Amino acid sequence: MSNIYGEWLRGQRARVGLTQQELADAAIMTRSHIAHIEAGRRVPSREDARRLDRALNTGNVLSSFLPQDDVAVADYFEAARQLEQQATVIREFALSYVPGILQTEAYARAVLRVSFPPRSAEECDRLVVTRLERAQVLSEPVTPVVWALLDEAVLRRPIGGPQVMAEQIAHLTRLVESERIRVHVLPFRLGVHSLLPGMVSLMWFEDQPPIAYSEATLLGKVHDSPALVQQLQATYDLALGDALPSRESLALMKAIAEDYDHHD
């Protein structure tokens, strides 16, 4: 998103001589939330913008000219990627393929190789490295807490072929068995479920409100409206209630990986 809004907010804060913490206190927000808005990583909710207008005595400028962040741009995931690195809890739902932070190199390469217009080998390499760097959030033994809710299609679709899939599912099972992540599978036999329309990622933070990120083909959006985030959380919980328990999900993943291993 354009950072004109964040730069203007920073300028108004400097005009009245407030630090980020002082503005946060006056607007009943967190300092890190102010920092993300000024850096262009987040858009304030309409209520936050009203409080900022009151704290800065800017009339209704900040609330009237909120950025329209639902426009698709080439780097639509960048804001979500940065937030992902700061999250203390991440809950992913995947409908078609393994979430980025859980992908192996071979699986990521198979996913990123298919695009229009076609990517060069150099660009594909760069994107694979970026995706693997995202996975470094799992290098800490506990934080962030990661749950992955996977449609069974994620495990059954042979992205990259049987060998790549066997390796990818083995990676997931190792993370589950080491108790680094938790995985639940929504089985085909369930039929329809509440998250069937698409992918969503939920994130919680130590010192700022939770957000959600949803994605479709060439489109992605960070949501920080409290009402919408709460609705997406409830939708996730509804689907989670229909999923297989953790132990049964792990057994299914192992069985599918074995099928790929024995594929002729």
Image: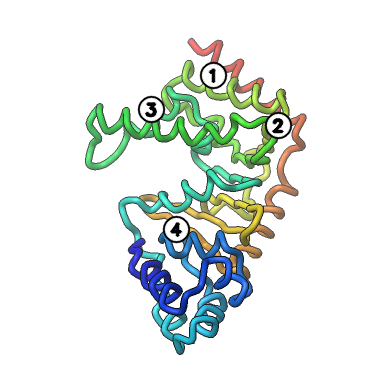
Q: Residue at x 73, y 38 (%)?
A: 244
Q: Which residue is mark 1?
A: 166
Q: Amino acid at mark 1?
A: Ala
Residue 71 in the figure: left or right of residue 210: left
Is disc 3 placed on a helix, strand or loop?
helix
> Closer to the N terminus: mark 1 or mark 2?
1
- Of labels 4 and 2, earlier in sequence is 4
What residue would you read off at disc 4? 41
Report the Cα–Cα distance between label 4 and label 2.
35 Å
Q: Tell whether label 2 touches label 4 (CB within 8 Å).
A: no
| Residue placed under numbered mark 2 in the picture | 249
Q: Are marks 3 and 2 in contact (CB under 8 Å)?
A: no
| Amino acid tagged 2 | Ser
Q: Position of residue 67 (x, y in %)?
A: 39, 71
Q: Secondary structure at mark 2?
A: helix
Question: Where does the image place residue 55, in percent across and percent down from the top left?
Answer: 54, 81
Q: Position of residue 54 (x, y in %)?
A: 54, 85
Q: Amino acid at mark 3?
A: Arg
- For label 4, the crowd category at 10 Å Cα-Cα, with few meaning under 14, some 14 to 19 and many 20 or more, is many
Q: Which is closer to the viewer, label 1 or label 3?
A: 3
Label 2 CA crowd tier, 10 Å (few <14, some 14–19, many 20+): many
Q: Secondary structure at mark 1?
A: helix
Instruction: Of the two numbered discs 1 and 4 on the same chain, state the one appearing first in sequence.
Output: 4
Amino acid bearing label 4: Arg
Q: Is residue 49 above or below residue 37?
A: below
Q: What percent of the width, then of the height, locates residue 96?
A: 50, 40
Seen from the viewer's position, the closer of residues 231 and 2 is 2
